[in-house]
Image (cartoon, helix red, strand yellow):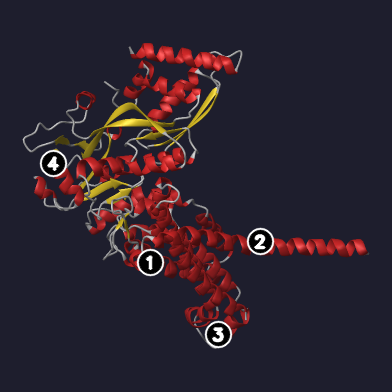
Amino acid sequence: MRWRRARERLIETLIRLSGFSAIAIVMLIFVFLLKEGVALFRTVPLGEFLTGQRWYPISEPPGFGVFPLICGSLLVTIGAAMLSVPLGIASALFISEIARGWMKELLKAGIELFAAIPSVVLGFIGMTLLAPLIRQAFHVPTGLTALTGSITLAFMAMPTIVSITEDALTAVPRGYREAAMALGATRWQMMVRVLLPAAGSGIVAAVMLGIGRVIGETMAVMMVTGNAAVIPHTMLQPVRTLTATIAAEMGETVRGSDHYFALFAIGIVLFVITFVVNLIADRFLHREQR
Amino acid sequence: MRTHAVAMMTAALMAGGALVAPRGSAEELQGSLQIKGSDTMVNLVQAWAEAFMAQHPQVTIAVTGGGSGTGIAALIGGTCDLAASSRAMSDKERAQAAAQGHTVREWKVALDGLAVAVHPANPVKRLTLQQLADLFTGRIRTWSAVNGSARAVVLLSREVNSGTHVYFKEHVLGPGKEFAPEALLMPSSQAIADEIATNPDAVGYYGMGYLNSRNSVVSVAKTPEGPYVEPSIASVQAGTYPIARPLLLYSRDESQGLTQAFLSFTLSPDGQAIVQQTDFVPLP
């Protein structure tokens, strides 16, 4: 009897430990990021870092202004969201409400397969097929633009948005659908006026998780956006994103240099952005559960 | 003369090896080497490594790219034995190495010409260094200023971790000048070659080895009076092509026998033949 209780307690402790370790690791990562990144602000003031428009990290004197990079990341992300959100919600509606039988299974499997495509492959397709197409279609000097990045990333956000939205739609009780139909609503009215609001918080969470994936994406975006650190005025200009900057430059920096600290500071900016996005998603998910 | 020096060095190494391992001979040189750095040099260093490993089956050599800065940072950090670099180490990097307690030795192992390339349809086939600087700093924004079409110039550059980027910035743009912020920073020389092949308004630069039939090379002159010179083995060796550079290997001073043997091999006639085979320019 005593042995059993001891075993029970041991297992409980182990599970508790693994639960806490997940939080502890995240905290440690954040502390590390903060420790390395904040060191930059001894030489470059925070305001100058966030609003500066010159990103010339290896010049003398160096320019550590990330404003164009933040603009680049946001523009690509907003563009990707504008493409993937309507498309994603529409295909989720189709899969959960209209498609039946083998078609439904095929579409679900296809979307999941989509999520399995490595980002570098999407980037390669974007670079070799999409970029020349965009250059010719819009008569712009180069096809490596924010729009190219947005389209490529929309393909990456789609699977997340579709599968979570579909889950949310499936979770809406059958009674809602039957009640709407019984009141004489058409299928379209039922979907738009009943299902979407009922699954609303789940859909917002899906969108936020999709956006989180887009903001953090690095490889594909580095290959297709041209990486010029200018403040973009249209979608048809090259941009440089926060993630691509870290990926492209991290290898070159020597530990302890200002450039190294600056890349960690960019990491903090990214962390804050994704944290906010996840926080919003979390709030909506919890509202759904209540 | 050089062959003689190499032979002596090899003999000395053999003797050194013999002291450590009683059965030792040149055939049984063993161990592993990590070489990291310049993307420009990665094919060359890989070819050297393969030939060297064929001669010494007990040796394994791992070659990775990532950019000259990456290699030098790794050498300073102690995560590689040799750094391949297409630019000289900066004073800052030397100071960083010294701070970590390393003295770093430089070995000039080959030459490279930086080719400036445009789309084959672009009528601009010759530029002066000044015009190149004006193009890449953004002072000239349309091709018409250099006798081309009236269309906007698309600048293609490498990322800042590339030795090619740093060399071009220092030797073509000039001290204190910056690339135009509009310049696209491409992740590799191959990406530049690919973009030029599909974009009639693009201009970019890369190591001579990347020249291909889908890009067209620009002749470069130091002054408007000329002569305009195309990058070639002869023009780079003779020093008449204006954008040529030495390719370097860096070792830490305390480096072991194997590192030294590999360095001697790169400078040997065999090693220099490999330089030519991989489209670089052997030392004169």
> In the image, residue A3 lies at what x, y percent?
91, 61
Q: Between tags 2 and 3, which lies in front?
A: 2
Q: Are marks 1 and 4 on the same chain?
A: no
Q: Nearer the viewer, mark 2 or mark 4?
A: 2
Residues at marks 1 and 4, CA–CA distance in whole angstroms: 45 Å
Residue under label 1: A46
A180 or A139: nearer the viewer? A139
Tag 1: amino acid: Leu
When the figure is inspected, residue B95 is found, relative to residue A12, above or below; the finding is above
Q: Nearer the viewer, residue A286 or A31?
A: A31
Q: Are marks 2 and 4 on the same chain?
A: no
Q: Which residue is mark 2?
A: A21
SS for tag 1? helix
Kindly identify the amino acid type of the residue bearing the numbered disc 3.
Ala
Whole-Å distance between the Cαs marked 2 and 4? Answer: 62 Å
Mark 4, residue position: B124
**Do the residues marked 1 and 3 share a common chain?**
yes
Tell me the amino acid under the disc marked 4. Val
Q: Residue at x 88, y 65 (%)?
A: A5
Picture coordinates of residue A185 (x, y %)? 51, 85
Question: Which is closer to the viewer, label 1 or label 2?
Answer: 1
Q: Which mark is residue A180?
A: 3
Disc 4 crowd, CA 10 A, few/some/many (<14, 14-19, 20+): some
